[in-house]
Amino acid sequence: MTASQPISRRQALQATGAAASLFVLPQIACSAANKSRVKAVMTQGVSGLTVNEIARSQGFFDEFNLDPEILQVSDGTKCVAALLSGAAQICVKSGFNQLTPAIERGAKIKILAGALNLPSLAMYSARPDVQHVADLEGKVVGIGSLGSVLHQMTAVLLRKKGVNVDTVKFRNVGNNAEVLKAVITKTIDAGLSDVDVIDQQQKFGIHALSDGLLWKEIPEYTNQGMYASDTAIKQDRELLVRVLAAYGRAYRFVCSPNSRDAFIKARQKATGSVEPSQALTQWKWIQQYQPYALNLTLTEARINLVQRINVEFKAQRAVMPFAAVADMSLAREALKLLV
């Protein structure tokens, strides 16, 4: 993989303009005078939409006087573009592997907090001869775009299991939900998808590889974080702190045992499906593994791991100092609001 080209302001505006026309989701029907409007961006995904709905339905946005407008985009590059163009003030859910190369190229952005710290994905296949990750050598594996979090996590898993990545045929089929469809229809040999179907493997004619559960195999890899531009941090600091606090409250709630019914309802609203089994599977997984950033802050080790992988992928030249890529002071301020 070669390093990406610098993002121009024109490209950022074009990317976010196209995305905004498709995926703007107002979270609250009416904006009260005492609420602060905040424009947030996130990558598409059921887990993020579910947490958003939890924050809304449980009153966590109201608690911190927030009226969020959520822009959904397809990948982290578009999140960066939205922040640089001013189309969004904060990214509330995205992998940040594409963020640090942008910072190296001059983008003024900082990682503010964790979100989904553990990868909630498993490697699935419908082929009976693919039972272990080592069996994927020479196979077609579904990913998102080259350089995406989905691609990076797949490659990290393959390397850990001794698979020669150069022999694997990567195919861009979209997000993890689309990867699952491709696995089921056998248009690919395997691919990463969400934990929410781990109890329905027989129903879909698929199986999770015995050593392909990412939350066990690469727990040190941070799935998603929250970040904002230096300009927004300077101009909207107090607002961003409240946003972090609202999501921190939501993370703690979904990880608590009394969240079951609210989580199922929130996921049903987020997906438009009334079938509760996948929601319950995901909720049970959350209870067991506590994957969210309950204390918001991310460690230097977690952020530097992603940077080192980027260097290996030739997406960035070198690991940058923690202070150049992250500012955890807002997360620490948000934690004080949660006491």
Image: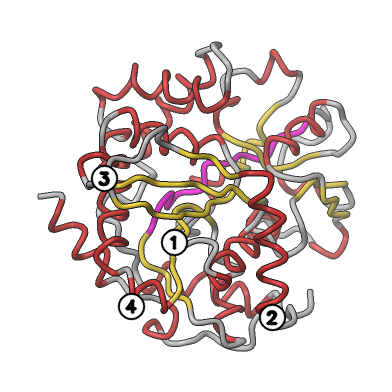
* Amino acid type of the residue that numbered disc 1 sits on in the rendered structure: Ile
The span from disc 1 to disc 2 (Cα, nearest Å) is 19 Å
The span from disc 2 to disc 4 (Cα, nearest Å) is 22 Å
Q: Check residue 234 in the rendering and tell me which mark sits there, or answer none.
A: 4
The span from disc 3 to disc 4 (Cα, nearest Å) is 24 Å
Please tell me which residue is depicted at 13% across the width and 58% down the height of the picture: 336
Name the foreground residue: 213 vs 227. 227
* Residue 239 placement (x, y as % from top left): 29, 61
Tag 2 or tag 3, which sits nearer the N-term?
2
- For the residues bearing labels 4 and 1, Cβ distance under 8 angstroms: no
- The quarter of the displayed image where residue 275 is located: top right
Secondary structure beneath disc 1? Answer: strand
- Is residue 43 positioned above or below 110 on the image? above
* Amino acid type of the residue that numbered disc 2 sits on in the rendered structure: Ser
* Residue 332 placement (x, y as % from top left): 21, 65
The magenta segment is 114-125
Secondary structure beneath disc 4? Answer: helix
- For label 1, the crowd category at 10 Å Cα-Cα, with few meaning under 14, some 14 to 19 and many 20 or more, is many
Say whether residue 121 is magenta: yes
Name the foreground residue: 2 vs 263. 263
Read off the residue under disc 2.
8
Tag 1 or tag 4, which sits nearer the N-term?
1
Q: Check residue 33 in the rendering and tell me which mark sits there, or answer none.
A: 3
Tag 3 or tag 1, which sits nearer the N-term?
3
* Amino acid type of the residue that numbered disc 4 sits on in the rendered structure: Lys
